[in-house]
Amino acid sequence: MLLTRSRFFFVLSAMVLLVVASAWFSLLLGPSELSFAQVWGAVTGAEAAGPEADIVLRIRWPRTLLAMLVGASLSVSGVVFQAMLRNPLADPFVLGVSGGAALGGIAALSLGAAAGFGYNAVPPAAFVGALVTTFLLYVIAGSGERVSANNLLLTGVVFNAFASAAIVFLASVAGLTEGSQIFLWLIGNLSAARSDVAGWVALFLALGLVASLLLGRSLNLLILGDEPAAQLGVATEAHKRVLLLATSLMVGAAVSVAGLVGFVGLIIPHLLRLVLGADHRLLVPAAALGGGAFLVVCDSVARTALGGRELPVGAITALVGGPLFLYLLRKHQQRVFAP
Amino acid sequence: MRTNAESRAFGVDPYAVSSPSKSGVMWRGPSSKFISIAVSLSLLHRFTLPFAVAAVVLANVAGAELPARIVSLNPSLTAILLALGEGERLVGVDDYSARQIGEVAALPRVGGLFNPSLEAVVALEPDLVVLVPSAEQRAFRERVEALGVGVEAFDNHAFDEVLENIERLGALTGARDAAAVRVAAIKHARGRVERAVAKLQSDGEAGGAANPREGHAAKPPTIAMVLQRDPLFVVGGGNFIDTMLTIVGVRNVAAEYSESYPRVSLEWLVARSPALLVDLSPEANDPRDTLAFWKQWPHIAAVENDRLIALDAALISMPGPALDASLLLLARTLWGEAIEGHLAVDAGRTAKSNAPGRLH
């Protein structure tokens, strides 16, 4: 599918509309059943004080925003990793950055409880875990003469295995309340949404987005393989390093606040590649918007499906995403992985 | 089933040794096997009546042989055993008991609530293992029993179940009297609080003495009990804390959830806007931080009207032997000074002995 300027703007405008629609859906939905007029009043500032405004502006909106940012981060990094590693199974968690973040966060949860840290200590600790892992990943698999996809994958797999073993150990010695927090965190959960947290995620999303947008053309060629890409004039190694760092940080930030929200970073890239073709100049921004909208809708369901009780959003993404993905795979068997 | 009738005709209570239990499981020590054989013998061979009587009497004597080595796998059961004065029978406890209850901190530990160690339990050579049958401990129970160790299971969600547990543990350890005293004290406290609350509520309705919490019997004030702030967990319906809330004359906003401790959304809490909010979370020991945290949500009625209460969870969240103290503490905390007069009138001199304080 040829990427023309008009097609680019048409697709992205449609996706922006989708995001706006999902945000409204999310703002309108909640266990307290506010009317459209009440939500509208709160959003437009007509009703600036009162419990309705609190619910819409300080509970639903930060959460919607965070879902949007986390969904976008995971989905964009899925696109980048799938292209860079030339592996259809790649998702944001494949390189072990998520494992490092999880280990950092859970260490803070289970060991920090004794030191008097609350749940607030988790995102910073998780981000430190992600940074350390990114650094190790870079040193082990990314700093040689060539950044080998296989080395990256193997390092990631091994690190994830190590991290999950360490997490199991921490979870076994953790107390009852810490145990439940660990469970929630591992399955992915957005209830910690606050605006300052969203700011940090937005910062790293911007970083990853800029890198992958600027290098969209390189991503298109990297799919062909390192050598063909190099022959076509891509500074493959340098570009891969930049992408590796930028997306790892983006994943680290997203995982730090939301835990391991699965499937968004796997199926949204594939879904959009199916519909839009594999030109990364379009695919990357579309994935940001599509991933954001998808997670916003999933989180709205997670917040309301059980009334006032909360479901972890990771359960919804997997429940919706799994069957959807299999259906698409069956329908377009030849096309899903073809670049 | 003629067992009961038959043996009552002999003037012998078949449950004299093994107390009746809701789950239908009795202590499986040797004496209980012996008595069941004896009773069935007496049924099958009516003509051997003298023998049967002798056997049952023998069994009763054997029944005096109480479990000397008990392993407790739940802090509430550990606390009950200690309160009944049977602490010296404990030879091992779970990690939570050891952490929460100073008296047993030095005992051998056999693992957590989710991962008790079979080997550690068996190595202590217990006569009896007591546990609360959570999902993990149900499977564990079968494995312990398969090794020939007696197990007693105790549900401890509902208020009345806790009272039953005290009585059953009393019967199992030969401390029936102590158990009866404890249960009576809890029931007495319950009655005192109920009468005092009823009086306060009728005063409020009559427009008499100002009711500090704006509640009356027809529409008691709503309350939320926050166990953990982030993620938000509250006390749900049907459990002993929920029952205590009803007794002290307030209505738990999360009673609609049958789950004991549901995870709810902040939005739900703001929308419900409980008139009273009790923060039991670990962070609540810092009053300034607690106030600052809840002030973020000024439209929750409890925050707006300054009805925010920080409580040490250990004082009311243990389904153990001190529910009377928990009840009185809740009543005094929620009603304030106003309830003192009514409690004192009712209880007379016993008021002092039931004053709230540390549980153990």
Image: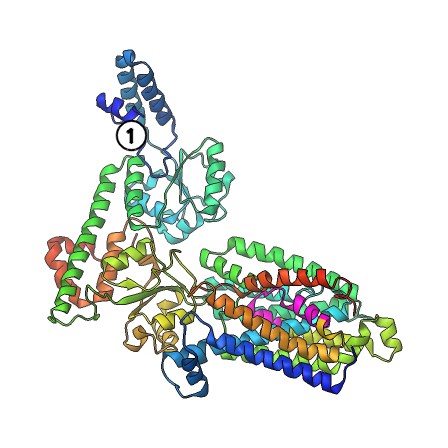
A112 displayed left or right of B216: right
B134 displayed left or right of B219: right
Q: Is A261 inside the magenta-drawn segment? A: yes
Q: Is residue A111 visible?
A: no
Residue, far right: A231
Q: Is residue B319 above or below residue A231?
A: above
Region of the chain picked out in magenta, as a range: A252-274
Q: Position of residue B174 (x, y in %)?
A: 28, 34
Q: Is residue A303 above or below residue A22?
A: above
| Foreground of the two, B359 or B33 | B33
Kindly report the secondary structure that dominates the magenta region of the rendered protein.
Answer: helix
Q: Is residue A74 above or below residue B10?
A: below
Type of amino acid at the residue the image marks with label 1: Tyr
Q: What residue is disc 1 on?
A: B15
Could you say which quadrant of the image residue B193 lies in? Answer: bottom left
Q: Position of residue A300 (x, y in %)?
A: 51, 70
Q: Position of residue B328 (x, y in %)?
A: 22, 58
Q: Is residue A93 above or below residue A231?
A: above
Number of numbered discs visible in the structure rendering: 1
